[in-house]
Image (cartoon, rainbow, N blue to C red):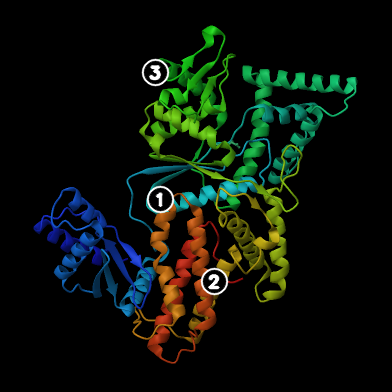
């Protein structure tokens, strides 16, 4: 927002340093929070350290040297257009604006940029975010929702920060779990098929529970029961063998049931406004991953122990020259020639790098897979992919319910769709009393936006590494750190602007803030001005929480402003004009923040 001033000052600093042979370090600017005025600052500690290292200039200790440079620079700067005054304090150069100028410029910037307010400059790197990749033949539960929401928000953040962004999914569509569902379907339910996309997906999850019960060893089994269970297991193994061998009937059953899962997944992604760019499947990298094994052996990264009756392994620690155990030794091809999850991840990464030209590769995956991913990244590094340094695992903790932990095997899961339906139902019952003037159809749409807002925000407001106990009552609360609380700030801003329109008042194209600002206005302006740097930080650190926390603070500042400052009744027309512009800017900033958080911004609720 203030790049012009920063640039101007930077040029003057550079000219001064060149003229005086000072080894200037890169200048980093930081905003100065309001303290009578707003401003931005930079320090000269690095420059002072550079000088000391070169043994140049006075022999002062670094802090004093930094202060000396700051003072010299300040003396050189003279007056700069738009700047009220400049200070040299403790090695820092503090540059201040006239408060009314700063306020006006922040508000003007938001209103001219609109939906683009906060967007970062275009970056040269391509980021791929892989998320929403549950295993098929199960149903989508709230844990998957956490994954999907974190991934989508991260994708929105990096995209808005200026990176070329690719959204990718990678469902696990093979393995014993998948075969288990197919086995029981074939045995007990052949030909059946519930109607409805969600019903079908959920049904598969039920089949899985039933199959698990039949295939699991029970306590105190009778010999007959044991024989029965073993016979079932033999059938399942036979089916797996056929699948592997490419048996057409088994493959067809697999394709059909897999599609039921994917249909449900696509439907939920649609509800969450997620548009995937690329679909990878575990089954599709299985074959390519076998080829990779040979390449890794040829390059002496993997060790082939098959001649001695072993497997193909990668001694990661040894190859990296680590003396302490970190990544351990890993199998990448079993003795029977089958690949592992790790092998497939290597093949997948190769495709991401070579076909999609990904520079930064993000994996949104359960924290429990952390070691697995670190191992994969380490092998990619041994393999010579420079992008390995920029692979990042965004892990996330477990989601449980107040009733206790979920278990797909036991059928104790909170299905996303059920939780969503419940949330919407609750919002509707409250809304029906509160906003009788909203037409019924509209109300359902808004209830869905609020219900989803509550769900989504509850997944974002907790550090991704921490576990969540998902409590629907808490999530739906209109107070505290919730989605509806932030949405409500947008609604309130909108209602002020609506009333303004009705009254026939229109704010001017620009507004002067040349009056004594209340602390609520200052706080609100300050938060709005922090939006661009918050996007940048959240994107660079891959931390959706940074944006989620900021959105709450912004909403909070607006709610306080709303309660304390009388906008429409302000006597002085120029102040009223400025305040209305501020409300409009706040509404835009909140809308932009909500959009990045994948939450709708309703105008009424
Ligand atoms: N399908 C896996 C699961 O549900 C997650 C895939 C993670 N991505 C990866 N490249 N390994 O656990």
The numbered disc on residue 226 is: none
Q: At which x and y percent is residue 49?
A: 23, 52
Which quadrant of the structure image shows residue 7? Answer: bottom left
Tell me which image quadrant ligand 1 sits in.
top right
Label 1 crowd bin: few (<14), some (14–19), many (20+), radius 10 Å? few
Label 1: which residue?
Answer: 540
Q: Which residue is drawn at 23% across and 62% down?
A: 64
Is disc 3 surrounded by few (<14), some (14 to 19) or many (20+) residues within 10 Å? Answer: few
Question: Which label sits on residue 489?
Answer: 2
Quadrant occupied by the N terminus = bottom left
Q: Quadrant of the C terminus?
A: bottom right
Which label sits in the foreground, 1 or 2?
A: 1
Instruction: Categorize mark 2 by other alpha carbons within 10 Å: few (<14), some (14-19), many (20+).
Output: many
Are the residues tagged 3 and 2 within 8 Å (C-beta)? no
As helix, strand or loop, the secondary structure at mark 3 comes to loop
Residue at the spot 47% in from the left edge and 49% down from the top edge: 155
**Disc with the residue nearer the chain's start (3 vs 2):** 3
Above or below for 237 versus 149 = above
Earlier-in-chain disc, 3 versus 1: 3
Is 532 on the left or on the right of 342, as rendered?
Answer: left
Q: Where is residue 485 in the image (x, y as percent from the top left)?
A: 59, 68
Quarter of the view holding residue 29: bottom left
Give above or below for 102 relative to 48: below
Q: Are marks 3 and 1 in contact (CB under 8 Å)?
A: no
Residue at far top of view: 307
Q: How far apart are marks 3 and 1 (CA)?
A: 34 Å
Q: Name the residue under label 3.
A: 299
Question: Is disc 1's CB within 8 Å of ligand 1?
Answer: no
Q: Can residue 344 be seen in this view?
A: yes
**Residue depth check, mark 3 versus mark 2: number of the one nearer the observer:** 3
């Amino acid at each position: 927002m203030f790049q012009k001033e920063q640039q101007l000052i930077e040029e003057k600093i550079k000219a001064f340093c060149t003229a005086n042979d000072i080894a200037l370090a890169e200048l980093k600017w930081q905003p100065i929070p309001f303290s009578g005025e707003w401003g931005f600052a930079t320090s000269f500690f690095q420059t002072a350290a550079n000088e000391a290292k070169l043994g140049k200039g006075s022999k002062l200790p670094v802090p004093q040297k930094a202060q000396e440079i700051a003072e010299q620079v300040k003396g050189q700067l003279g007056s700069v257009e738009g700047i009220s005054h400049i200070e040299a304090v403790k090695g820092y150069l503090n540059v201040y604006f006239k408060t009314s100028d700063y306020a006006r410029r922040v508000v003007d910037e938001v209103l001219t940029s609109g939906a683009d307010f906060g967007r970062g400059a275009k970056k040269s790197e391509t980021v791929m975010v892989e998320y929403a990749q549950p295993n098929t033949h199960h149903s989508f539960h709230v844990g998957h929702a956490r994954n999907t929401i974190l991934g989508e928000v991260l994708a929105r953040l990096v995209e808005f920060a200026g990176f070329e962004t690719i959204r990718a999914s990678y469902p696990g569509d093979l393995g014993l779990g998948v075969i288990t569902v197919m086995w029981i379907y074939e045995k007990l339910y052949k030909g059946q098929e519930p109607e409805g996309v969600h019903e079908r997906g959920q049904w598969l999850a039920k089949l899985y529970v039933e199959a698990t019960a039949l295939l699991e060893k029970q306590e105190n089994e009778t010999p007959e029961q044991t024989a029965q269970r073993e016979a079932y297991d033999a059938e399942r193994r036979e089916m797996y063998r056929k699948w592997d061998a490419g048996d057409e009937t088994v493959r067809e059953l697999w394709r059909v049931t897999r599609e039921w899962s994917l249909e449900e997944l696509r439907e939920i992604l649609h509800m969450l406004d997620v548009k995937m760019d690329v679909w990878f499947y575990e089954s599709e990298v299985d074959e390519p991953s076998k080829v990779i094994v040979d390449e890794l052996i040829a390059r002496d990264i993997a060790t082939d122990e098959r001649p001695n009756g072993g497997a193909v392994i990668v001694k990661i620690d040894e190859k990296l020259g680590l003396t302490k155990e970190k990544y351990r030794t890993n199998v990448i091809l079993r003795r029977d020639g089958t690949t592992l999850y790790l092998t497939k991840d290597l093949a997948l990464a190769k495709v991401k790098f070579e076909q999609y030209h990904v520079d930064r590769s993000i994996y949104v995956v359960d924290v429990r897979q952390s070691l697995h991913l670190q191992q994969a990244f380490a092998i990619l590094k041994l393999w010579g992919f420079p992008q390995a340094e920029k692979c990042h695992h965004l892990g996330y903790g477990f989601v449980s319910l107040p009733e206790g932990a979920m278990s797909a095997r036991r059928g104790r899961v909170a299905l996303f769709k059920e939780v969503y339906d419940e949330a919407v139902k609750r919002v509707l019952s409250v809304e029906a009393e509160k906003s009788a003037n909203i037409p019924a159809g509209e109300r359902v749409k808004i209830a869905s936006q609020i219900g989803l807002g509550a769900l989504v925000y509850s997944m974002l407001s907790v550090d991704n590494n921490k576990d969540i106990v998902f409590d629907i009552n808490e999530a739906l609360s209109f107070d505290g750190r919730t989605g509806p609380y932030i949405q409500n700030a947008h609604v309130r801003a909108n209602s002020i602007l609506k009333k303004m329109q009705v009254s026939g008042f229109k704010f001017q194209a620009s507004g002067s803030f040349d009056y004594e600002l209340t602390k609520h206005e200052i706080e609100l302006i300050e938060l709005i001005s922090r939006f661009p740097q918050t996007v940048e930080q959240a994107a660079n650190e891959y931390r959706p929480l940074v944006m989620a926390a900021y959105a709450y603070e912004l909403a909070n500042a607006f709610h306080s402003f709303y309660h304390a400052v009388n906008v429409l009744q302000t006597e002085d027309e120029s102040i009223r004009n400025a305040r209305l512009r501020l409300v409009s800017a706040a509404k835009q900033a909140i809308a932009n923040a909500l959009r990045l958080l994948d939450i709708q911004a309703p105008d009424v609720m």
